[in-house]
Amino acid sequence: MNNLIKFVFLCLLMVLVKPLVGTAQEGISLTLIPPTTITNQVDLDIRAGLRNEQQRTKMVELSIYIGDERPENLLHYVKKELLPQQAYEVKHILPTQDRIGNNRIILVVKDGEKTYRKVRDIEVISSTQRSTGLIDGAWAGIYHWSETEGKHWNTDIKKMTDGQWREMVQAMHKLKMDIVVIQEVFRNEEYVGKHQTTVESYKGKAFYPSKRYPERVPIAANDPVEAILDEADKLNMHVFVGVGMFAWFDFTPESLEWHKIVAKELWEKYGHHASFYGFYVSEESGGNLDNWEHSEVKRMERKKEIVDFFREFKTYCNQIAPAKPVMLATNSMQVPAGLDTYPALLQNLDILCPFGFARMPKGDLTGKESADLLQSLCDRAGAHLWFDLETFLFNEDQSLYPRPVAEIVRDLNRFQNFEKILCYQFPGVFNDPKMSIRIGEARTVDLFRDYQRYMEKTIKERLSKVPSSTKAQY
Protein backbone atom coordinates (compact mmCIF):
# COMPACT_ATOMS: atom_id res chain seq x y z
CA MET A 1 0.00 0.00 0.00
CA ASN A 2 2.86 2.38 0.85
CA ASN A 3 4.39 1.79 -2.59
CA LEU A 4 1.04 2.54 -4.25
CA ILE A 5 0.73 5.81 -2.33
CA LYS A 6 4.26 6.78 -3.37
CA PHE A 7 3.45 5.98 -7.01
CA VAL A 8 0.27 8.10 -6.96
CA PHE A 9 2.17 10.96 -5.28
CA LEU A 10 4.91 10.87 -7.93
CA CYS A 11 2.33 10.93 -10.73
CA LEU A 12 0.62 13.95 -9.21
CA LEU A 13 3.97 15.68 -8.76
CA MET A 14 4.83 15.12 -12.41
CA VAL A 15 1.53 16.65 -13.50
CA LEU A 16 2.11 19.69 -11.29
CA VAL A 17 5.73 20.24 -12.34
CA LYS A 18 5.33 19.65 -16.07
CA PRO A 19 3.94 23.15 -16.85
CA LEU A 20 7.15 24.65 -15.45
CA VAL A 21 9.52 22.75 -17.73
CA GLY A 22 9.07 23.94 -21.31
CA THR A 23 10.21 21.69 -24.18
CA ALA A 24 10.95 22.05 -27.88
CA GLN A 25 7.55 20.51 -28.59
CA GLU A 26 5.86 23.38 -26.73
CA GLY A 27 7.49 25.77 -29.17
CA ILE A 28 9.38 27.79 -26.56
CA SER A 29 13.07 28.59 -26.80
CA LEU A 30 15.59 30.93 -25.20
CA THR A 31 18.85 31.65 -27.04
CA LEU A 32 21.78 33.82 -26.03
CA ILE A 33 24.10 35.22 -28.70
CA PRO A 34 26.88 34.61 -27.85
CA PRO A 35 26.03 31.57 -25.70
CA THR A 36 29.23 31.21 -23.63
CA THR A 37 31.59 33.49 -21.67
CA ILE A 38 31.82 37.03 -23.05
CA THR A 39 33.66 40.19 -22.07
CA ASN A 40 31.88 43.29 -20.86
CA GLN A 41 32.73 44.95 -24.17
CA VAL A 42 30.12 42.75 -25.92
CA ASP A 43 26.37 43.30 -25.74
CA LEU A 44 24.30 40.18 -25.07
CA ASP A 45 21.66 39.40 -27.68
CA ILE A 46 18.74 37.65 -25.96
CA ARG A 47 16.34 35.82 -28.27
CA ALA A 48 13.04 34.32 -27.10
CA GLY A 49 11.09 32.18 -29.53
CA LEU A 50 7.45 31.11 -29.43
CA ARG A 51 5.49 28.88 -31.75
CA ASN A 52 1.83 27.99 -31.34
CA GLU A 53 1.76 24.24 -31.97
CA GLN A 54 -1.98 24.02 -31.27
CA GLN A 55 -4.87 24.25 -33.70
CA ARG A 56 -6.44 27.20 -31.89
CA THR A 57 -5.50 30.83 -31.45
CA LYS A 58 -4.06 31.57 -28.02
CA MET A 59 -2.91 34.57 -26.01
CA VAL A 60 0.51 34.34 -24.37
CA GLU A 61 2.50 36.60 -22.07
CA LEU A 62 6.28 36.62 -22.37
CA SER A 63 8.64 38.04 -19.75
CA ILE A 64 12.45 38.09 -19.70
CA TYR A 65 14.25 38.60 -16.38
CA ILE A 66 17.86 38.80 -15.29
CA GLY A 67 18.87 37.27 -11.95
CA ASP A 68 15.47 36.36 -10.59
CA GLU A 69 11.80 37.05 -11.23
CA ARG A 70 11.41 40.35 -9.44
CA PRO A 71 9.73 43.35 -11.10
CA GLU A 72 12.92 45.43 -10.95
CA ASN A 73 14.76 42.68 -12.89
CA LEU A 74 12.31 42.61 -15.79
CA LEU A 75 14.10 43.22 -19.10
CA HIS A 76 11.24 42.71 -21.54
CA TYR A 77 7.49 42.04 -21.46
CA VAL A 78 5.01 41.46 -24.26
CA LYS A 79 1.50 40.08 -24.58
CA LYS A 80 0.89 38.43 -27.94
CA GLU A 81 -1.93 36.64 -29.72
CA LEU A 82 -0.62 33.68 -31.74
CA LEU A 83 -2.56 32.07 -34.55
CA PRO A 84 -2.33 28.28 -35.04
CA GLN A 85 1.23 27.33 -36.19
CA GLN A 86 2.33 30.97 -35.96
CA ALA A 87 5.86 31.70 -34.75
CA TYR A 88 7.06 34.80 -32.93
CA GLU A 89 10.52 36.00 -31.91
CA VAL A 90 11.57 38.60 -29.34
CA LYS A 91 15.01 40.20 -29.46
CA HIS A 92 16.43 42.11 -26.51
CA ILE A 93 19.94 43.63 -26.44
CA LEU A 94 21.52 43.76 -22.98
CA PRO A 95 24.63 45.93 -22.41
CA THR A 96 27.09 44.05 -20.20
CA GLN A 97 29.46 46.80 -19.08
CA ASP A 98 28.16 46.56 -15.50
CA ARG A 99 27.20 42.86 -15.54
CA ILE A 100 30.57 41.34 -14.60
CA GLY A 101 30.20 37.88 -13.05
CA ASN A 102 27.66 35.12 -13.58
CA ASN A 103 24.30 36.17 -14.95
CA ARG A 104 21.08 34.19 -15.19
CA ILE A 105 18.56 34.98 -17.93
CA ILE A 106 15.03 33.68 -17.31
CA LEU A 107 12.25 33.42 -19.87
CA VAL A 108 8.73 33.06 -18.45
CA VAL A 109 5.84 32.29 -20.78
CA LYS A 110 2.28 32.26 -19.51
CA ASP A 111 -0.24 30.42 -21.64
CA GLY A 112 -3.58 30.60 -19.87
CA GLU A 113 -3.21 28.69 -16.60
CA LYS A 114 0.14 27.17 -17.59
CA THR A 115 3.53 28.74 -16.99
CA TYR A 116 6.72 27.67 -18.74
CA ARG A 117 10.29 28.67 -17.95
CA LYS A 118 13.59 28.55 -19.76
CA VAL A 119 16.86 29.48 -18.04
CA ARG A 120 20.29 30.29 -19.50
CA ASP A 121 23.40 31.24 -17.54
CA ILE A 122 26.29 33.28 -18.91
CA GLU A 123 29.55 34.61 -17.48
CA VAL A 124 30.69 38.16 -18.22
CA ILE A 125 34.36 38.98 -17.61
CA SER A 126 35.99 42.38 -17.33
CA SER A 127 38.19 43.28 -20.27
CA THR A 128 39.39 46.14 -22.44
CA GLN A 129 38.78 44.10 -25.61
CA ARG A 130 35.84 42.26 -27.14
CA SER A 131 37.49 38.84 -27.41
CA THR A 132 38.01 36.54 -24.42
CA GLY A 133 41.46 35.62 -25.78
CA LEU A 134 40.55 31.93 -25.93
CA ILE A 135 39.09 29.56 -28.52
CA ASP A 136 35.39 29.26 -27.68
CA GLY A 137 34.43 26.44 -30.05
CA ALA A 138 35.40 24.41 -33.09
CA TRP A 139 34.21 22.85 -36.30
CA ALA A 140 33.72 19.10 -36.23
CA GLY A 141 33.77 17.73 -39.74
CA ILE A 142 32.44 14.17 -39.67
CA TYR A 143 34.59 13.32 -42.69
CA HIS A 144 36.81 15.88 -44.39
CA TRP A 145 35.49 16.96 -47.78
CA SER A 146 38.95 16.84 -49.41
CA GLU A 147 40.96 13.64 -49.44
CA THR A 148 44.03 15.79 -50.14
CA GLU A 149 43.54 18.18 -47.21
CA GLY A 150 42.31 15.41 -44.91
CA LYS A 151 45.07 13.00 -45.95
CA HIS A 152 46.38 12.50 -42.41
CA TRP A 153 43.05 11.83 -40.72
CA ASN A 154 40.29 10.76 -43.12
CA THR A 155 41.20 7.07 -42.86
CA ASP A 156 40.94 7.27 -39.07
CA ILE A 157 37.85 9.44 -38.83
CA LYS A 158 35.83 7.00 -40.95
CA LYS A 159 36.38 4.38 -38.23
CA MET A 160 34.91 6.48 -35.41
CA THR A 161 31.92 4.95 -33.67
CA ASP A 162 29.04 6.87 -32.15
CA GLY A 163 30.73 6.40 -28.77
CA GLN A 164 33.98 7.86 -30.04
CA TRP A 165 32.14 10.93 -31.36
CA ARG A 166 30.92 11.36 -27.81
CA GLU A 167 34.55 11.19 -26.67
CA MET A 168 35.39 13.90 -29.20
CA VAL A 169 32.73 16.20 -27.72
CA GLN A 170 34.10 15.50 -24.23
CA ALA A 171 37.61 16.39 -25.46
CA MET A 172 36.35 19.71 -26.87
CA HIS A 173 34.70 20.45 -23.53
CA LYS A 174 38.02 19.91 -21.73
CA LEU A 175 39.43 22.80 -23.75
CA LYS A 176 36.28 24.89 -23.16
CA MET A 177 35.51 24.72 -26.88
CA ASP A 178 31.85 24.53 -25.99
CA ILE A 179 30.42 25.66 -29.34
CA VAL A 180 30.43 22.80 -31.87
CA VAL A 181 29.88 23.40 -35.58
CA ILE A 182 29.01 20.25 -37.51
CA GLN A 183 30.58 21.00 -40.89
CA GLU A 184 27.88 19.34 -43.00
CA VAL A 185 25.33 16.55 -42.74
CA PHE A 186 25.49 15.59 -46.45
CA ARG A 187 28.42 15.02 -48.79
CA ASN A 188 27.99 16.23 -52.37
CA GLU A 189 31.09 17.49 -54.16
CA GLU A 190 29.51 19.88 -56.68
CA TYR A 191 30.17 23.56 -57.37
CA VAL A 192 27.79 26.37 -58.24
CA GLY A 193 27.32 26.84 -61.98
CA LYS A 194 28.89 23.46 -62.76
CA HIS A 195 26.04 21.07 -62.02
CA GLN A 196 22.39 20.42 -62.90
CA THR A 197 21.35 19.08 -59.48
CA THR A 198 17.76 19.61 -58.34
CA VAL A 199 15.88 18.82 -55.16
CA GLU A 200 14.58 15.66 -56.84
CA SER A 201 17.81 14.56 -58.53
CA TYR A 202 20.08 15.25 -55.54
CA LYS A 203 22.51 12.35 -55.08
CA GLY A 204 24.42 13.51 -52.01
CA LYS A 205 25.06 11.03 -49.22
CA ALA A 206 23.96 11.60 -45.63
CA PHE A 207 25.96 11.44 -42.41
CA TYR A 208 22.79 10.64 -40.46
CA PRO A 209 19.69 8.45 -41.03
CA SER A 210 17.81 10.74 -43.45
CA LYS A 211 14.37 9.71 -44.67
CA ARG A 212 14.37 12.15 -47.59
CA TYR A 213 17.82 11.22 -48.95
CA PRO A 214 18.63 7.80 -47.43
CA GLU A 215 21.94 7.00 -49.16
CA ARG A 216 24.74 7.12 -46.56
CA VAL A 217 28.40 8.12 -46.47
CA PRO A 218 30.36 4.92 -45.66
CA ILE A 219 31.47 5.60 -42.06
CA ALA A 220 31.37 3.38 -38.98
CA ALA A 221 29.12 5.65 -36.90
CA ASN A 222 25.38 5.10 -37.30
CA ASP A 223 24.28 8.60 -36.25
CA PRO A 224 27.17 10.88 -35.29
CA VAL A 225 24.82 13.89 -35.33
CA GLU A 226 22.72 12.35 -32.56
CA ALA A 227 25.85 11.33 -30.64
CA ILE A 228 27.28 14.86 -30.79
CA LEU A 229 24.02 16.53 -29.75
CA ASP A 230 23.23 14.07 -26.97
CA GLU A 231 26.69 14.35 -25.44
CA ALA A 232 26.60 18.14 -25.80
CA ASP A 233 23.28 18.13 -23.89
CA LYS A 234 25.00 16.51 -20.92
CA LEU A 235 27.85 19.05 -20.93
CA ASN A 236 25.72 22.17 -21.49
CA MET A 237 27.38 22.79 -24.86
CA HIS A 238 25.95 24.40 -28.01
CA VAL A 239 25.80 22.83 -31.46
CA PHE A 240 25.34 24.39 -34.89
CA VAL A 241 23.98 21.73 -37.21
CA GLY A 242 25.46 22.13 -40.70
CA VAL A 243 22.70 22.29 -43.33
CA GLY A 244 24.66 21.20 -46.40
CA MET A 245 26.21 20.25 -48.70
CA PHE A 246 23.99 20.99 -51.70
CA ALA A 247 26.88 22.43 -53.70
CA TRP A 248 29.80 24.68 -52.82
CA PHE A 249 29.01 28.41 -52.98
CA ASP A 250 25.52 27.61 -54.30
CA PHE A 251 22.75 29.97 -53.15
CA THR A 252 20.45 29.46 -56.14
CA PRO A 253 16.67 29.00 -55.70
CA GLU A 254 17.09 25.22 -56.06
CA SER A 255 19.69 25.19 -53.29
CA LEU A 256 17.34 27.24 -51.11
CA GLU A 257 14.52 24.71 -51.51
CA TRP A 258 16.91 21.85 -50.67
CA HIS A 259 18.10 23.68 -47.55
CA LYS A 260 14.52 24.18 -46.37
CA ILE A 261 13.78 20.46 -46.76
CA VAL A 262 16.91 19.41 -44.88
CA ALA A 263 16.53 22.05 -42.13
CA LYS A 264 12.98 20.85 -41.49
CA GLU A 265 14.07 17.22 -41.27
CA LEU A 266 16.95 18.10 -38.95
CA TRP A 267 14.72 20.15 -36.66
CA GLU A 268 12.04 17.46 -36.53
CA LYS A 269 14.63 14.77 -35.82
CA TYR A 270 16.98 16.61 -33.46
CA GLY A 271 15.17 19.76 -32.30
CA HIS A 272 14.37 18.25 -28.91
CA HIS A 273 18.03 18.49 -27.92
CA ALA A 274 18.82 21.39 -25.60
CA SER A 275 22.22 21.73 -27.31
CA PHE A 276 20.70 22.33 -30.79
CA TYR A 277 21.82 25.94 -30.95
CA GLY A 278 21.29 26.98 -34.56
CA PHE A 279 21.72 26.30 -38.27
CA TYR A 280 25.06 26.58 -40.05
CA VAL A 281 24.88 26.94 -43.85
CA SER A 282 27.80 24.82 -45.09
CA GLU A 283 28.19 26.26 -48.60
CA GLU A 284 30.65 29.04 -47.61
CA SER A 285 31.44 32.03 -49.84
CA GLY A 286 34.28 34.27 -50.92
CA GLY A 287 34.60 37.55 -49.06
CA ASN A 288 33.64 39.31 -52.31
CA LEU A 289 30.24 37.49 -52.23
CA ASP A 290 30.32 37.02 -56.02
CA ASN A 291 32.27 33.74 -55.91
CA TRP A 292 34.88 34.86 -58.40
CA GLU A 293 32.63 35.06 -61.46
CA HIS A 294 34.35 36.66 -64.47
CA SER A 295 31.59 38.83 -65.92
CA GLU A 296 29.95 41.76 -64.13
CA VAL A 297 26.50 40.39 -64.97
CA LYS A 298 27.31 37.02 -63.41
CA ARG A 299 28.91 38.63 -60.35
CA MET A 300 25.77 40.66 -59.69
CA GLU A 301 23.65 37.53 -60.18
CA ARG A 302 25.62 35.66 -57.50
CA LYS A 303 25.33 38.60 -55.11
CA LYS A 304 21.58 38.77 -55.59
CA GLU A 305 21.30 35.01 -55.04
CA ILE A 306 23.08 35.07 -51.68
CA VAL A 307 20.94 37.97 -50.41
CA ASP A 308 17.71 36.31 -51.56
CA PHE A 309 18.81 32.95 -50.13
CA PHE A 310 19.39 34.21 -46.59
CA ARG A 311 16.30 36.41 -46.59
CA GLU A 312 14.13 33.39 -47.41
CA PHE A 313 16.08 30.81 -45.38
CA LYS A 314 16.14 32.96 -42.25
CA THR A 315 12.39 33.58 -42.54
CA TYR A 316 11.81 29.83 -42.92
CA CYS A 317 14.01 28.94 -39.93
CA ASN A 318 12.22 31.53 -37.80
CA GLN A 319 8.95 29.84 -38.67
CA ILE A 320 9.98 26.27 -37.75
CA ALA A 321 12.51 27.09 -34.99
CA PRO A 322 12.13 30.70 -33.79
CA ALA A 323 15.14 32.24 -31.99
CA LYS A 324 17.63 29.77 -33.48
CA PRO A 325 20.44 31.72 -35.20
CA VAL A 326 21.75 31.14 -38.72
CA MET A 327 25.50 31.30 -39.37
CA LEU A 328 27.66 31.47 -42.52
CA ALA A 329 31.45 31.23 -42.90
CA THR A 330 33.04 33.31 -45.66
CA ASN A 331 36.69 33.92 -46.32
CA SER A 332 38.14 37.29 -45.36
CA MET A 333 39.51 38.17 -48.78
CA GLN A 334 38.40 40.82 -51.30
CA VAL A 335 35.80 42.14 -48.85
CA PRO A 336 35.72 45.63 -50.47
CA ALA A 337 34.32 44.01 -53.64
CA GLY A 338 31.28 42.93 -51.61
CA LEU A 339 30.52 46.26 -49.94
CA ASP A 340 27.48 46.74 -52.18
CA THR A 341 26.00 43.47 -50.88
CA TYR A 342 26.98 43.02 -47.22
CA PRO A 343 24.37 45.44 -45.80
CA ALA A 344 21.47 43.52 -47.38
CA LEU A 345 22.98 40.11 -46.58
CA LEU A 346 23.65 40.90 -42.93
CA GLN A 347 20.05 42.00 -42.39
CA ASN A 348 19.11 38.30 -42.54
CA LEU A 349 22.26 36.62 -41.22
CA ASP A 350 22.64 36.34 -37.46
CA ILE A 351 26.32 35.39 -37.38
CA LEU A 352 29.09 35.91 -39.93
CA CYS A 353 32.16 33.79 -39.11
CA PRO A 354 34.98 34.52 -41.62
CA PHE A 355 38.29 32.67 -42.00
CA GLY A 356 41.69 33.19 -43.62
CA PHE A 357 42.83 36.42 -41.94
CA ALA A 358 46.34 35.03 -41.46
CA ARG A 359 46.87 34.32 -45.19
CA MET A 360 45.60 37.41 -46.99
CA PRO A 361 46.79 37.58 -50.63
CA LYS A 362 49.20 40.23 -51.84
CA GLY A 363 47.43 43.46 -52.82
CA ASP A 364 44.43 42.82 -50.54
CA LEU A 365 43.67 44.37 -47.18
CA THR A 366 45.68 43.16 -44.22
CA GLY A 367 43.94 40.64 -41.98
CA LYS A 368 43.37 43.30 -39.32
CA GLU A 369 41.96 45.77 -41.87
CA SER A 370 39.57 43.14 -43.19
CA ALA A 371 38.46 42.24 -39.65
CA ASP A 372 37.84 45.89 -38.78
CA LEU A 373 35.87 46.49 -41.99
CA LEU A 374 33.68 43.43 -41.42
CA GLN A 375 33.12 44.50 -37.82
CA SER A 376 31.84 47.89 -38.94
CA LEU A 377 29.48 46.24 -41.44
CA CYS A 378 28.10 43.86 -38.82
CA ASP A 379 27.70 46.64 -36.26
CA ARG A 380 25.64 48.72 -38.68
CA ALA A 381 23.40 45.76 -39.56
CA GLY A 382 23.00 44.46 -36.01
CA ALA A 383 24.68 41.16 -36.94
CA HIS A 384 27.32 39.24 -34.98
CA LEU A 385 30.91 38.84 -36.17
CA TRP A 386 32.74 35.72 -34.99
CA PHE A 387 36.17 34.45 -36.06
CA ASP A 388 36.94 31.13 -37.74
CA LEU A 389 40.57 30.77 -36.60
CA GLU A 390 42.58 28.35 -38.74
CA THR A 391 44.48 25.97 -36.44
CA PHE A 392 46.13 24.17 -39.35
CA LEU A 393 48.85 24.80 -41.91
CA PHE A 394 49.37 23.35 -45.40
CA ASN A 395 52.07 20.85 -46.33
CA GLU A 396 53.61 21.11 -49.82
CA ASP A 397 51.07 18.52 -51.05
CA GLN A 398 48.24 20.70 -49.61
CA SER A 399 47.48 18.25 -46.82
CA LEU A 400 46.73 19.84 -43.45
CA TYR A 401 48.77 19.55 -40.28
CA PRO A 402 48.43 21.11 -36.79
CA ARG A 403 49.58 24.70 -36.50
CA PRO A 404 52.10 25.44 -33.73
CA VAL A 405 50.39 26.79 -30.62
CA ALA A 406 52.59 29.93 -30.66
CA GLU A 407 51.06 30.94 -34.00
CA ILE A 408 47.55 30.26 -32.72
CA VAL A 409 48.19 32.39 -29.63
CA ARG A 410 49.58 35.15 -31.87
CA ASP A 411 46.27 35.30 -33.75
CA LEU A 412 44.26 35.19 -30.53
CA ASN A 413 46.14 38.26 -29.36
CA ARG A 414 46.16 39.96 -32.75
CA PHE A 415 42.42 39.79 -33.51
CA GLN A 416 40.66 41.18 -30.45
CA ASN A 417 37.45 42.55 -31.96
CA PHE A 418 35.61 39.25 -32.41
CA GLU A 419 32.98 38.46 -29.78
CA LYS A 420 33.55 34.72 -30.31
CA ILE A 421 36.51 32.79 -31.69
CA LEU A 422 35.91 29.32 -33.13
CA CYS A 423 38.55 27.24 -34.88
CA TYR A 424 38.76 24.94 -37.85
CA GLN A 425 38.86 22.22 -36.94
CA PHE A 426 39.00 19.87 -33.95
CA PRO A 427 39.07 16.32 -35.41
CA GLY A 428 42.43 15.65 -37.03
CA VAL A 429 44.05 18.78 -35.56
CA PHE A 430 43.52 18.33 -31.79
CA ASN A 431 43.55 14.95 -30.07
CA ASP A 432 42.90 14.28 -26.40
CA PRO A 433 45.46 11.61 -25.42
CA LYS A 434 42.76 9.94 -23.31
CA MET A 435 40.51 9.22 -26.29
CA SER A 436 40.20 5.58 -27.36
CA ILE A 437 41.18 6.53 -30.92
CA ARG A 438 43.68 9.03 -32.30
CA ILE A 439 42.51 10.92 -35.37
CA GLY A 440 45.53 11.83 -37.48
CA GLU A 441 49.14 12.52 -36.59
CA ALA A 442 50.89 12.22 -33.22
CA ARG A 443 51.53 15.98 -33.12
CA THR A 444 47.75 16.54 -32.80
CA VAL A 445 48.16 15.29 -29.22
CA ASP A 446 50.97 17.81 -28.69
CA LEU A 447 48.73 20.64 -29.85
CA PHE A 448 45.94 19.51 -27.50
CA ARG A 449 48.33 19.56 -24.54
CA ASP A 450 50.03 22.82 -25.56
CA TYR A 451 46.75 24.66 -25.99
CA GLN A 452 45.36 23.18 -22.75
CA ARG A 453 48.35 24.61 -20.85
CA TYR A 454 47.82 28.01 -22.50
CA MET A 455 44.09 27.96 -21.68
CA GLU A 456 44.65 27.04 -18.05
CA LYS A 457 47.34 29.71 -17.67
CA THR A 458 45.07 32.37 -19.23
CA ILE A 459 42.14 31.50 -16.97
CA LYS A 460 44.40 31.49 -13.89
CA GLU A 461 45.72 34.94 -14.78
CA ARG A 462 42.18 36.17 -15.37
CA LEU A 463 41.02 34.95 -11.96
CA SER A 464 44.00 36.55 -10.25
CA LYS A 465 42.71 39.95 -11.43
CA VAL A 466 39.17 39.42 -10.13
CA PRO A 467 38.45 41.32 -6.85
CA SER A 468 37.86 38.99 -3.90
CA SER A 469 34.37 40.45 -3.49
CA THR A 470 33.48 39.28 -7.01
CA LYS A 471 35.46 36.02 -7.13
CA ALA A 472 32.70 34.05 -5.38
CA GLN A 473 30.54 34.52 -8.47
CA TYR A 474 33.03 32.68 -10.72
Image: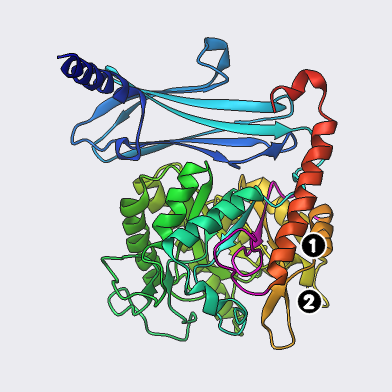
Above or below — where is 82 with respect to 284?
A: above
- Nearer-N-terminus badge (1/2): 2
Residue at the location (69% across, 65% down)? 445
Q: Determine whether, in the image, residue 179 is placed left or right of residue 83.
A: right
Residue 105 in the image: x percent, y percent? Answer: 54, 27
Q: Determine whether, in the image, residue 171 is placed left or right of residue 97.
A: left
Q: Which residue is mark 2?
A: 361
Above or below — where is 280 with respect to 93?
A: below
Dominant SS type (magenta): loop
Residue 395's quadrant in the figure? Answer: bottom right
Residue 155 in the image: x percent, y percent? Answer: 53, 79
Please provide the residue range marked out in magenta: 415-441
Q: Quadrant of the N terminus?
A: top left
| Closer mark to the observer between disc 1 and disc 2 | 1
Residue at the location (42% across, 49% down)? 230
Q: How is the image coloured?
A: rainbow
Above or below — where is 454 with respect to 29?
A: below
Q: Quadrant of the C terminus?
A: top right
Amino acid marked by disc 2:
Pro
Q: Determine whether, in the image, residue 416 is placed left or right of residue 208.
A: right
- Residue 327 in sight in this render: no
Q: Which of the labelled discs sits on residue 405, or is there none? A: 1
The secondary element bearing badge 2 is classed as: loop
**Crowding near the residue tagged with mark 1, few <14, some 14–19, many ≥20 C-alpha atoms within 10 Å:** some
Question: 197 or 172: which is nearer to us?
Answer: 172
Residue reaching furthest to the top: 71
**Crowding near the residue tagged with mark 2, few <14, some 14–19, many ≥20 C-alpha atoms within 10 Å:** few
**Mark 1–mark 2 CB contact (< 8 Å):** no
- Residue 417 is one of the magenta-drawn residues: yes
Spatial distance from mark 1 to mark 2, Cα to Cα?
Answer: 23 Å
